[in-house]
Image (cartoon, helix red, strand yellow):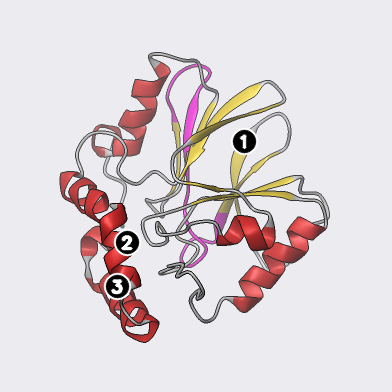
């Protein structure tokens, strides 16, 4: 809060999130309160939905003045071009998840789910979020090598048509730093549960840091 100008949240902040017309999931009040405090202090915040919270709509924008993105976005800081996003469903492979995501993000699917009572709908979604490996990413526990890391392949593909300095994604929940070219790097931020990692740009370079209580 003392020295941050911009905060990027790259998805999966919530295990599940769904916005009914008049109801949002119970809990998370301290997280939402802290985000409101940071935003009110003048820090710009951007939220990218992940595969766990892909049903976010406009609650954050209306209540917290935090824009919500469903696709990667470009940002330029100090003449450094970033491509930032959550990262699910990008690149080659992952066909099972891509098919499932099309179903889940279909307006008709969301309309049907909205008719479930929140006590039933949220409990069902939370159960699936943990048990369904396509959603939970339970198998995303180790580095697969550049050729099998779909986000690395996606980043390399994007470099063929445009010069980027940094690709920054979440989704894999593994802290990764991979050099793509003489001028471009790929980063995965890791997570706050097992690795306690986050990324920081000091105006010159982007790097991963590890959170400590000190």
Instruction: State the residue in front, 122 or 190.
Output: 122
Q: Secondary structure at mark 3?
A: helix
Q: Which secondary structure class fits the magenta region best?
A: loop
- Rendered-image quadrant of the C terminus: bottom right
Instruction: State the residue in front, 80 or 11.
Output: 11
Report the disc number at residue 206.
Answer: 1
Specify whether 33 is left or right of 154. Answer: right
x and y percentages locating residue 29 in the rendered image: 62, 77
Is residue 95 covered in magenta? no
Q: Count every numbered label the image shows and give the total.
A: 3
Specify whether 80 is left or right of 39. Answer: left
x and y percentages locating residue 40 in the rendered image: 80, 59
x and y percentages locating residue 102 in the rendered image: 24, 48
10 Å crowding of disc 1: few (<14), some (14-19), many (20+): some
Residue interval drawn in magenta:
179-197
Instruction: State the residue in front, 161 or 205.
Output: 161
- Gap between marks 3 and 1, in whole Å? 32 Å
Pointer 2: what residue?
Answer: 110
**Could you tell me if the residues under marks 3 and 2 are in contact, i.e. CB atoms within 8 Å?**
no
Examine the rendered structure and indicate whether residue 170 appears above or below residue 104: above
Is residue 187 covered in magenta? yes
The mark that comes first in sequence, 3 or 2, is 2
Report the disc number at residue 130.
Answer: 3
**Could you tell me if the residues under marks 3 and 1 are in contact, i.e. CB atoms within 8 Å?**
no
The mark that comes first in sequence, 2 or 1, is 2
The mark that comes first in sequence, 3 or 1, is 3
Which is in the foreground here, disc 3 or disc 2?
2
Specify whether 123 is left or right of 209. Answer: left
10 Å crowding of disc 3: few (<14), some (14-19), many (20+): some
């Amino acid at each position: 809060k003392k020295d941050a100008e911009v905060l990027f949240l790259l998805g999966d902040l919530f295990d599940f999130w769904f916005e009914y017309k008049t109801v949002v999931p119970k809990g998370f009040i301290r997280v939402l309160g802290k985000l409101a405090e940071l935003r009110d202090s003048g820090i710009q915040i951007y939220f990218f939905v992940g595969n766990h919270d892909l049903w976010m709509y406009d609650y954050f924008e209306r209540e917290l003045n935090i824009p919500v993105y469903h696709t990667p976005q470009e940002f330029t800081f100090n003449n450094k071009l970033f491509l930032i996003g959550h990262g699910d469903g990008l690149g080659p492979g992952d066909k099972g998840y891509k098919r499932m995501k099309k179903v889940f993000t279909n307006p008709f699917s969301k309309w049907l789910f909205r008719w479930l009572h929140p006590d039933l709908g949220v409990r069902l979604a939370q159960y699936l979020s943990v048990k369904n490996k396509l959603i939970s990413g339970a198998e995303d526990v180790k580095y697969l090598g550049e050729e099998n890391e779909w986000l690395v392949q996606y980043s390399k593909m994007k470099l063929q048509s445009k010069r980027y300095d940094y690709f920054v994604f979440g989704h894999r929940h593994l802290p990764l730093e991979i050099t793509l070219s003489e001028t471009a790097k790929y980063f995965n931020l890791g997570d706050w549960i097992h690795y306690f990692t986050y990324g920081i740009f000091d105006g010159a370079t982007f790097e991963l840091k590890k959170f400590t209580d000190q």
